[in-house]
Amino acid sequence: MSLSHAILGLLTYRPLTGYALKKIFDKSISHVWAASLSQIYRELSALEKKGYVHSTIKKQKDRPDKKIYNITEEGRNAFQEWLKDFSGTFSSPKRDEFMLKIFFGSKLEKEQLITEFSQFILQKKEYLKSLKEIEENFSRYRREFTIDIPEKEEIFWSFTIKRGIMNLEVAIKWAEECIEELKSYGND
């Protein structure tokens, strides 16, 4: 998946500003594809050059003018083509520095490893909390976005959240078990 396709997908619901796209990202798909506001604006510019989106300026009296982005027919077609092409790739390439360090963990003190696993658990629990909040509030977010997102979309959004939650729960359980093993390791 790419940022450009995530943006095109969100624009299929309705025209949006870059700022509105960022708010929707944070409340819906940031758990599968995160993006900063500057990345979103940079990608919107590239999409506009390709002819996949076009923008209009909405004048405002009390604030700076808004640039509103609309998906073009060419953009819809590109999004649909991307959406249909799974190409048998179901996971991304692995680059996990934490796991690489764990692989070489025998070179560290047991207490340091326990501390690192504990930090890992805290981070994953915090992320789990945010995913559960998103899951609980899908309907409210759909209304808040003032986007015409059909209710049927929620099931597909929930599939991604469900996977994220389950992955985090397994990762937390794994780290807890590693801590327990480390605590008894070398105590024979």
Image (tube, helix red, strand yellow):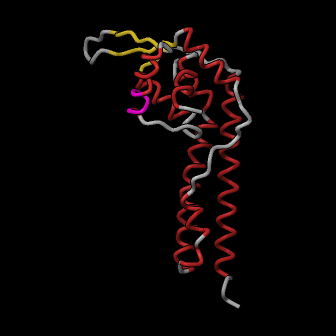
Quarter location, residue 56? top left
Q: Residue at x 55, y 61 (%)?
A: 98
Q: Is residue 153 above or below residue 100?
A: above
Residue placed furthest toward the right: 88
* 70 vs 48, nearest the viewer: 48
Quarter location, residue 12? top right
Is residue 83 left or right of 24 when viewed as pictured?
right
Q: Residue at x 42, y 19 (%)?
A: 17
Q: Is residue 179 above or below residue 131?
A: below
Give the magenta-colored segment's residue range: 38-42
Residue 32 counted in the magenta span: no
Residue 40 counted in the magenta span: yes
Q: Is residue 23 above or below residue 105?
A: above
Q: Residue at x 59, y 37 (%)?
A: 134
All told, the count of numbered labels is: 0
Indicate the position of residue 175 as horizontal and vertical percent values: 64, 65
Examine the residues drawn in magenta and state their main secondary structure: helix
Indicate the position of residue 125 as horizontal and vertical percent values: 58, 55
Indicate the position of residue 148 as horizontal and vertical percent values: 58, 15
Residue placed furthest toward the left: 62
Is residue 137 left or right of 4 when viewed as pictured?
right
Quarter location, residue 105? bottom right
- Quadrant containing the C terminus is bottom right
* 67 vs 124, nearest the viewer: 67
Q: Residue at x 53, y 64 (%)?
A: 119
Indicate the position of residue 1 as horizontal and vertical percent values: 60, 33
